[in-house]
Image (cartoon, grey):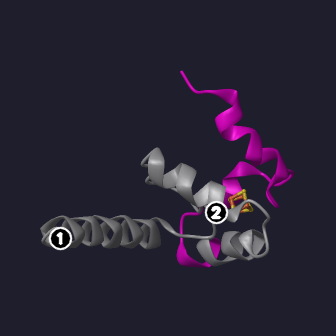
Amino acid sequence: MENPAETKWMADGNCANKAPSVFFPSDGVGVEKAKLVCEGCPVTDQCLEYAIAHRIDHGVWGGTSERQRRRIIRARAQKRAANAQQPALQVN
Ligand code: SF4
């Protein structure tokens, strides 16, 4: 069950009074229109991290398209993997 505090930020978003359908477009033009609403949104970071944490595949979240979020997730995973392969620092 979701913690209500986890989604409290949604009320502060630029989209708070927009139809949810705007953020689940069916084509690239719709994606760009939704991203325009996200521009300057005060909760962009929370929105993006929420979508990534909950693996939300569909829609525009945090000013990103589905494809952009997949890229972000992949880049973060690659960075984690690269960091894990680095030898530990030796402290004398
Ligand atoms: S970043 Fe976009 S989708 Fe997220 S709360 Fe703001 S306006 Fe809404």
Percent of width and height locating residue 15 = 79, 57
Percent of width and height locating residue 33 = 70, 75
Residue drawn at x 20%, y 66% is 81
Disc nearer the start of the sequence (1/2): 2
Residue 52 in the image: above or below residue 4: below
In the rendered image, which residue does mark 1 sit on? 92
**Where on the picture, by quarter, is residue 24?**
bottom right
Q: Crowding near pointer 1: few (<14 within 10 Å), some, many (20+)? A: few
Residue drawn at x 63%, y 70% is 63
Residue 38 visible in the current orientation: yes
| Separation of residues labelled 1 and 2 (CA atoms) | 40 Å
In the image, taking residue 62 as reference, residue 10 lies left or right, namely right
Looking at the rendered structure, the kind of residue marked 2 is: Asp
Span colored in magenta: 1-30
Q: Which mark is residue 45?
A: 2
Residue 13 in the image: above or below residue 65: above
**Where on the picture, by quarter, is residue 73?**
bottom left
Foreground mark, 1 or 2, reads: 1
Question: Who is closer to the viewer here, 81 or 13?
Answer: 81
In the image, taking residue 54 as reference, residue 91 lies left or right, namely left
Q: What element carries label 2?
A: helix
Q: Residue 12 carries which label?
A: none
